[in-house]
Image (spheres, rainbow, N blue to C red):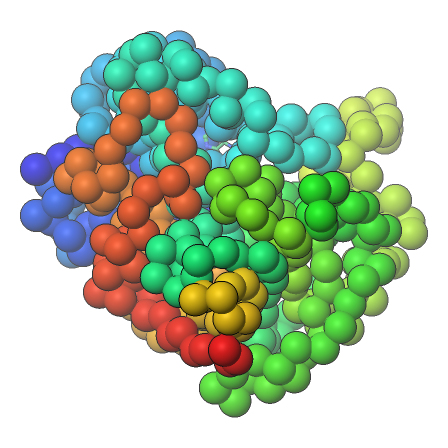
Amino acid sequence: MSRVLIIGAGGVGQVVTHKCAQVPNIFTDICLASRRISKCNQIASQLKRPIETAEIDADNVAELVKLIQKFKPDVVINVALPYQDLHIMDACLETGVDYLDTANYEPPDEARFCYQWQWDYHRRFKERGIMALLGSGFDPGVTNVFCAWAQKNHFDQIHEIDIIDCNAGEHGQPFATNFNPEINIREVTAKGRYFENGHWMETEPLSVSKEFDFPEGIGARKIYLLYHEELESLVKHIKGLKRIRFWMTFSDNYLKHLEVLQNVGMTRIEPIIYNGHKIVPLQFLKALLPDPASLGPLTKGRTCIGCLIKGLKDNKEKTYYIYNICDHQKCYAEVRSQAVSYTTGVPAMIGAMLMVTKTWHGKGVFNMEEFDPQPFMEKLKIHGLPWTEVILKT
Ligand code: NDP
């Protein structure tokens, strides 16, 4: 018996709401709140059971506190944008309610994401006796749990991790992003960054690439090195790690459009004055691009996200690969969303489920790999994200 407040009625929010509604024995009461109540009501109308909806400006802490006090949730799932993280955490602190998100804080006026802002809440959450679970999506999220699982069951020491994210799906649009365009483009156009031998190394955006042969018929694809937030927490929590990198596939078509948009200044986040109005070019571009939620019925193909891990077991070198494959059309048939929203929304629901059942329990601010991976891995298989592991070399 628990009450969940979901904030953000976008692509991911839709999946989280469907998945929470599928487990009425755990989530007995659900409220979906977002900037526009019409979007919440549209999602509510897709469900077989009634939920509450509310309009909220999640940048307004007083408004959030009022909503939390009225609905009295056991946990708040934040699937709005990274800009809202600290405001929602402030409201959770004030009301004494547990918090979960899928992306770390990012200031709107600076394309830089980093856990430190949220880790700085650890003492206050601990003193208040509440828990925050950070990054409970797929990457970050399941990828962190995959690493904890490998550490627990397959290695004495992990030396290298490559997190590899492939979207082998096609939506047929000239240019679109699979999650919020503003956040996606900020991430992809930033400098690459990886950790090696105790140092962070920086690379020019999308300048490092190679081929990777994906399993189960997906085949060889070009992958590009990016900086991703789970690298920061995994370096802290996986002891003895010598190198960790994050890679993502992009189609030539996506990269061609992105290059042109960058060259003409459309991906800039500094405001400009146009006809007397202040506009941010990237926000204007977001308004023109397809809403990721609209890609649901159009997208075909599969995603494959996993971790390639090298290290030592019983003094022998071992290479191990663990991944999930998710089919866009199957996701749409189940929750009317494509696989990128699905692979994020399912782990958010599972994280919340482990919190409200006190299976994962703590006071303070935590990353996923700090908890026992076993129950999370079991729930992935039950709730739509089965995983496969292979030992490539011992
Ligand atoms: P969307 O843009 O589709 O959805 C965001 C929702 O939040 C929208 O409904 C939006 O409202 C709402 N929102 C934005 N600002 C506010 C505010 N101030 N107050 C209330 N509601 C607000 O994004 P996605 O669903 O694609 O992504 C959601 C989150 O998931 C993001 O933080 C993203 O970074 C994260 N993510 C994490 C992944 C992972 O694997 N860990 C992968 C993919 C995404 P409106 O509709 O009015 O714009």
Residue at 54% x, 63% y: name it.
311
Is 269 situated left or right of 366 in this image?
right
Is 156 situated left or right of 180 in this image?
left
In the image shown, does 290 or 391 lie closer to the viewer?
A: 391
Query: Where residue 293 appears, x then y in whole percent?
Result: 48, 56
Is 191 situated left or right of 160 in this image?
right
Query: Where residue 322 appears, x then y in whole percent?
Result: 45, 69
User: Would residue 79 be seen by someone viewing this image from the given angle?
Assistant: no
In the image shown, does 24 or 116 lie closer to the viewer?
A: 116
In the image shown, does 284 or 370 lie closer to the viewer?
A: 370
Residue at 81% x, 30% y: name it.
270
Q: Hey, which residue is sitting farthest front in the picture? A: 315
Is 48 situated left or right of 65 in this image?
left
Q: Name which quarter of the figure residue 363 lies in.
A: top left
Query: Where residue 324 appears, x then y in whole percent?
Result: 42, 70
User: Would residue 187 be seen by someone viewing this image from the given angle?
Assistant: yes
Picture layout, residue 125 above or below residue 294: above
Picture layout, residue 119 above or below residue 182: above
Picture layout, residue 339 above or below residue 5: below
Residue at 39% x, 12% y: name it.
124
Q: Which quadrant does the N terminus fall into? A: top left
Residue at 43% x, 78% y: name it.
390
In the image shown, does 195 or 159 lie closer to the viewer?
A: 159
Q: Name which quarter of the figure residue 253 lies in.
A: bottom right
